[in-house]
Amino acid sequence: MSFNRYKNIIEEGDTVILYINPQAMYAIQAQSVIENRKGEKIENVMQTKYGALKISSLFGKQFGSKVSLSNGWAHVLYPTPELWTQTLPHRTQIIYTPDISLIMFMLELKPGSIVVESGTGSGSLTHAMAFRVKPSGHIYTYDFHEQRADQAQKEFKSHGLSENVTSQCRDVCQNGFSDDVTGKADAVFLDLPHPHLVVPFAIKALKPSGGGRICTFSPCIEQVMRTCQTLLDHGFVQLKTVECLEKEYQVLNRTVTTFTTASRPPPPSSGPQNTTEESSNEKKFLACIPSSNPRGHTGYLTTATYLMDTRLQQQQEVEVEDACEK
C-alpha cells in the first residue's frame, strides 16, 4: 500500500479507512487471517457498533465502495494523510490537520524540500510532510524512544513512504542530529519539551546559504519565551508566534415563533374591554450557528528564518575582495 500512488482495487495487506460516520472511522489492515492471543490463526473479523465486518470480503472491491456490516453499512476509503491523522494508533499526543497545514505553510515546504523533524511521535505530521515534499524531497525524523522510532519506520515502509522518510532513534537534545543531514535541510521542525536546546544543532543542519526555516510546537508560553530568546541569540530573524484556534460554524434549520397584535371593534353594549388580540406565526430559516464545543488551545507555533552562516558570509566577502584586487 502506498500513500503516494493511488490504486483502485483493495488487495491483501492494504491499509483501508473504514468510514461509518465522522465520529466513527477506523484504519484497518486488510488481512484475511490474524493471530489471536494464543498464537492461533483465525479469520479476521472486525467488530464495530454497527456490526461485524469480515475483512476478506473487502478484497477485489474498489476504494470508495459501500460495504455491508451485520447491522448497517460503511464506506471503504483510500488512505490519505488527513484520514490517517484521524485514525492512526496513538503512541503519543499527535498534531492535527489545522496545525499541520499551518506548519507546512510557515515552513514553506514544497516538492523537493529537505526537512529535519524531532520528535516523530505517532507520525501524524511526518506523513503529511512526506506527501508534500515528494517525489524528490526527504524527511529525516528523530525520536528518543526506540520502540516508537522502530514502529514509525515500519509504518512508513508499509505505506510506501520509506523512499521519502528516514526514521532514527536519537536524543537530539543531547547528541544533535546525525551527520548525514549536516548542511542539507531547508527546514527544521521541533516538537520537544526543550526546543531551545536543539537550536544550535538546527543551525548545523540548515543549509549554510541561509533562508532556512525553523518551527517549534510548544504547549506552554514559558517554552516559547525561552525558545525565542535562544533564536535571537543565534542570529535568527522574522520571529513569529501564532496559535491556531479552529471555530466551526454549522448551517442548521431554525424556527422562530413571532407574535402579531391585531385590533378588533368592541362588542355592542359592553363596558371597557381589551380590544386587541395576539396571533402567532412560525418563521423558518437557515442560520450559521457556532459550535457549542469549540476546540481549545493545542500549542504555540514559533517560526523564524536563519540568515546566511557567518562563516560562509565571511568567505564570500573575502572572495569578493580578492576578485576586486585582481
Image (tube, rainbow, N blue to C red):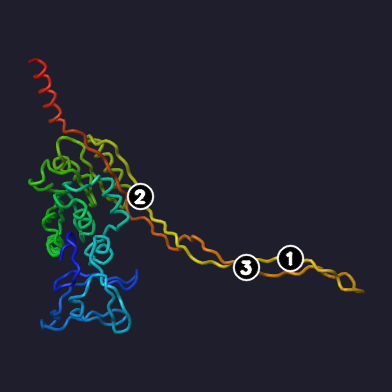
Type of amino acid at the residue the image marks with label 2: Glu
Of 112 and 298, the residue lying toward us: 112
Secondary structure under the numbered disc 3 in the rendered image:
strand
The quarter of the displayed image where residue 50 is located: bottom left
Q: Are marks 3 and 2 in contact (CB under 8 Å)?
A: no
193 left or right of 259?
Answer: left
Q: Nearer the viewer, mark 2 or mark 1?
A: 1
> Farthest residue in the right direction?
269
Q: What is the C-alpha distance between the residues marked 3 and 2? A: 40 Å
Disc on the earlier residue, 3 or 2:
2
Of 80 and 240, the residue lying toward us: 80
Q: Which disc is residue 257 wearing?
A: 3
User: Where is residue 262 drawn, in percent x and y?
Assistant: 76, 66
Relative to 106, is 58 above or below? below
Q: Which disc is residue 243 wearing?
A: 2
Q: Crowding near pointer 3: few (<14 within 10 Å), some, many (20+)?
A: few
Type of amino acid at the residue the image marks with label 1: Thr
In what quadrant of the picture does the N terminus appear? bottom left
Secondary structure under the numbered disc 1 in the rendered image:
strand
User: Where is residue 139 drawn, in percent x and y?
Assistant: 15, 51
Q: Residue at x 17, y 61 (%)?
A: 5
Q: What is the C-alpha distance between the residues marked 2 and 1? A: 51 Å
> Farthest residue in the top direction?
325
Location of mark 1 (residue): 261
Secondary structure under the numbered disc 2 in the rendered image:
strand
Relative to 267, is 138 above or below? above
Q: What is the C-alpha distance between the residues marked 1 and 3? A: 14 Å
Q: Crowding near pointer 1: few (<14 within 10 Å), some, many (20+)?
A: few
249 left or right of 85?
Answer: right
Q: Crowding near pointer 2: few (<14 within 10 Å), some, many (20+)?
A: some
Type of amino acid at the residue the image marks with label 3: Thr
